Image (spheres, rainbow, N blue to C red):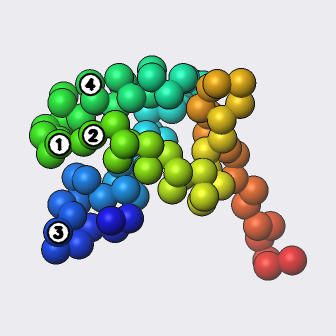
Amino acid sequence: MITPTKGIAPQRALVVVGAQVLQLLDRPMTVSQTWARLKEWRSGHGHHAPLPFWWFVLSLDVLYALGVLELDRDLLRRRQANAAPAGGE
């Protein structure tokens, strides 16, 4: 369910939905704003596979577990990744 499988279409895989969420989070937004924006974006880009709210929330859980999303004062925001320094030190 995190990645596409025989039973989970690529449009519904949590990693794909999560990537779409991250793409849309160009500024902090509430969960409801993010949900509305994601539905609008998916509709406009031909992603017609059903996406229930609970599935959207699971994608947020995956993003949080990966450390790329945080909820701060009821606003979702992307976390800045700390890149390893060049040269492996």
Sequence-first disc among 4 and 2: 4
Q: Are marks 1 and 3 in contact (CB under 8 Å)?
A: no
Q: Are marks 1 and 2 in contact (CB under 8 Å)?
A: yes
Instruction: Identify the image quadrant of the N terminus.
Output: bottom left
Q: Are marks 4 and 2 in contact (CB under 8 Å)?
A: no
In the rendering, at what x and y percent does residue 49 appear?
A: 15, 45
Query: Distance from label 3 to label 4 (Cα)?
Result: 25 Å
Q: Is residue 28 left or right of residue 32?
A: right
Query: Which residue is found at the position 35% from the left and 47% from the top?
Result: 55
Q: Amino acid at mark 1?
A: Pro
Q: Along the line of sight, which residue is nearer the eye, 68 or 72?
A: 72
Query: Which residue is found at the position 17% from the left and 69% from the top?
Result: 7
Q: Which SS class for mark 2?
A: loop
Q: Mark 1 highlights which residue?
A: 50
Q: Residues within 10 Å of mark 4 (few under 14, many from 20)?
A: few
Residue 52: give its label: 2
Q: Mark 3 highlights which residue?
A: 7
